[in-house]
Image (cartoon, grey):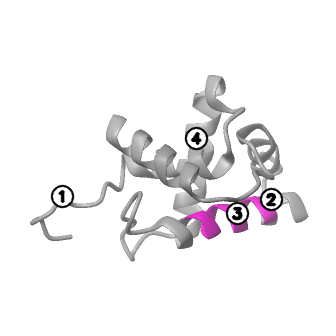
Amino acid sequence: MKKVTIAATLLLALTAHAEFKDGNKLLSQMQKEYAGNDWFNAIGYVTGVVDAHNGTLFCVPATSTASQLFDLSKQYIRDNPSTRHLPADLLIAVALGKPFPCPKKGQAL
């Protein structure tokens, strides 16, 4: 878990971009429960992070659903209030890194 967190932090730190969404804002949108734009924005954000970092920070199986990834991300953010001030993309990477680690060199997916 430490390696995933460190890798996620380093990769995201090297990427020049503004942080528009932190964990507090994303969790607020996630809790709208399929009720309008906020919820759709939240699930779109999660799937965007997965599309951008799958295969580098985590390795999500092709059989995973957007709903499953959303639920895992929401649970992690909800259960770790001390990290909610951090960028939402970093929190999603940490949330998915533990259940879906990438294989080490020489291991098959």
Circles 2 and 1 in contact, beta carbons < 8 Å: no
Name the residue that disc number 3 marks.
45
Quarter that holds the N terminus:
top left
Residue carrying label 4: 75
Mark yes or no: residue 84 visible.
Answer: yes
Do residues under tags 1 and 3 come within 8 Å of each other at their CB atoms? Answer: no
Residue at point 61% right, 68% down?
47
- Give the spatial CA distance, label 2 vs label 4: 15 Å
CA separation in Å, label 1 and label 4 = 26 Å
Q: Amino acid at mark 2?
A: Trp
Check disc 3 and report its element: helix, strand or loop: helix
Residue 49 pos. (x, y %): 59, 64
Q: In the rendering, which numbered label is found on residue 68?
A: none
Q: Secondary structure at mark 1?
A: loop
Q: CA distance from mark 2 to mark 3?
A: 10 Å
| Residue 28 magenta | no
In the picture of the structure, the residue carrying the numbered disc 1 is 104
- Name the dominant secondary structure of the magenta segment: helix
Residue type at tag 3: Tyr
- For marks 2 and 1, the one nearer the N-term is 2
* Cα distance in 3D space between marks 2 and 1: 35 Å
How far apart marks 4 and 3 lie (CA) works out to 15 Å
Mark 4 secondary-structure assignment: helix
- Residue 48, position as x, y percentages in the image: 63, 69
- CA–CA distance in space, label 1 to label 3: 27 Å
